[in-house]
Image: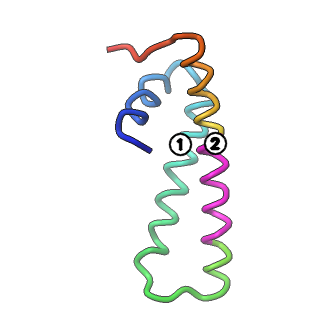
Amino acid sequence: MEPREEEFIVSLLDKDPELKKYYEEHQELEKRLGGFQHKSHLTPVEEVEKKRLQKLKLAGKDKIMEILGKYRQTGIQRET
């Protein structure tokens, strides 16, 4: 996610429990995927798990973007 997008998301976390849930899941999946990046070779099982986590992360990001789109449509802006 772009830094500007992430700032907007963080500003909405306290207002939107659904957004908070997806954002926290996204962060956790990113952390778990990072563990695979440090390995020079993945076993077939690890490769399958990596792909599964990537798909979950992408689906979660899609939901986050959908929620942000609704906020942008209604004109709610980040509070500064």
Quadrant in which the N terminus appears? top left
In magenta stretch: residue 70: no
Q: Pick out the residue farthest to the front.
A: 73
Towards the viewer: 70 or 28: 70
Residue 79 on image: x %, y %: 38, 13
Q: Which residue is mark 2?
A: 62
Q: Identify the mark nearer the N-term, 2 or 1.
A: 1
Name the residue located 62 percent from the left edge and 52 percent from the top edge.
58
Please tell me how many numbered marks the rendered image carries: 2
| Mark 2 Cα shell of 10 Å, populated few (<14), some (14-19), many (≥20) | few
Towards the viewer: 70 or 60: 70
Quadrant in which the C terminus appears? top left
Q: Write down the quadrant of residue 38 in the picture.
A: bottom left
The secondary structure that dominates the magenta segment is helix
Q: Is residue 20 above or below residue 73?
A: below
Q: Which mark is residue 2?
A: none
Name the residue located 64 percent from the left edge and 32 percent from the top edge.
66
Q: Pick out the residue farthest to the left.
A: 80
Three-letter code for the amino acid on which mark 2 is drawn:
Asp
In magenta stretch: residue 57: yes
How is the model colour-coded? Answer: rainbow
Q: Which residues are magenta?
A: 50-62
Mark 2 to mark 1: distance in Å? 14 Å
Three-letter code for the amino acid on which mark 1 is drawn:
Glu
Name the residue located 50 percent from the left edge and 89 percent from the top edge.
41
Q: Which residue is mark 1?
A: 24
Q: Is residue 40 above or below residue 10?
A: below
Left or right of 33 in this view: 50: right
